Image (cartoon, rainbow, N blue to C red):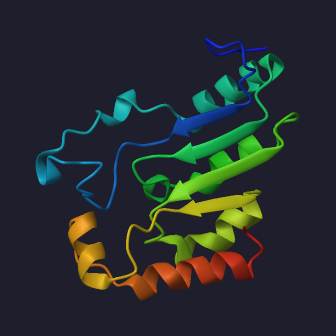
Amino acid sequence: MIKDLLGRELRDLRISVTDRCNFRCVYCMPDGESYEFFPREEILSFEEIARFVKAIIPLGIRKVRLTGGEPLLRRRIENLIQMLAGLEGIQDLSLTTNGFLLKEKAKALKEAGLERITVSLPSLKEEKLSYLVGKKVKVSQILEGIEKALELGLH
């Protein structure tokens, strides 16, 4: 078992699968367009991520959350989801997204074995949302992605 400094068992693992993002949120990338990303060769491969998760399952990890940057920008992210969903011992596999690409990706994510999605949506007011994420965004596009995910059984 892995424990924190207070002796509590740690069962959750958060993995940032990319630092790339299609938004430039004021609270996440305050440098905007000048934000420096990791070189691609320093980003873990799907195989490396899956091996790491498999190695720590015996230490009590039961929940895995994929984050970023924006994880849906990672090419073939559904392949990683399929790898992780197939690991014995993982009871909950989820992904945090800004929702911009969710409508087009939801079906592949569900078919790969994803169970849950968290959508970061800092405002339902278009003008405020666009300011916060650093680009013009239609709230309806994100809401349509959420609707599609719900329709497919992602919760």
Give the image location of residue 128, x and y in percent: 26, 76
Nearest the eye: 14 or 49: 14
Nearest the eye: 125 or 110: 125
Which residue is found at the position 72% from the left and 67% from the top?
155
* Left or right position of 62 against 130: right
Which residue is found at the position 58% from the left and 77% from the top?
146
Mark yes or no: residue 76 visible.
no
**Where 60 falls versus 155 (above or below)?**
above
Q: Residue furthest left?
A: 34
* Left or right position of 43 against 65: left
Which residue is found at the position 14% from the left and 53% from the top?
33
Which residue is found at the position 36% from the left and 30% from the top?
41
Give the image location of residue 103, x and y in percent: 55, 78
Mark yes or no: residue 93 visible.
yes
Give the quadrant of the N terminus.
top right
**Where 126 falls versus 154 (above or below)?**
below
**Where 16 falls versus 100 (above or below)?**
above
* Left or right position of 3 against 101: right
Give the image location of residue 17, x and y in percent: 49, 41
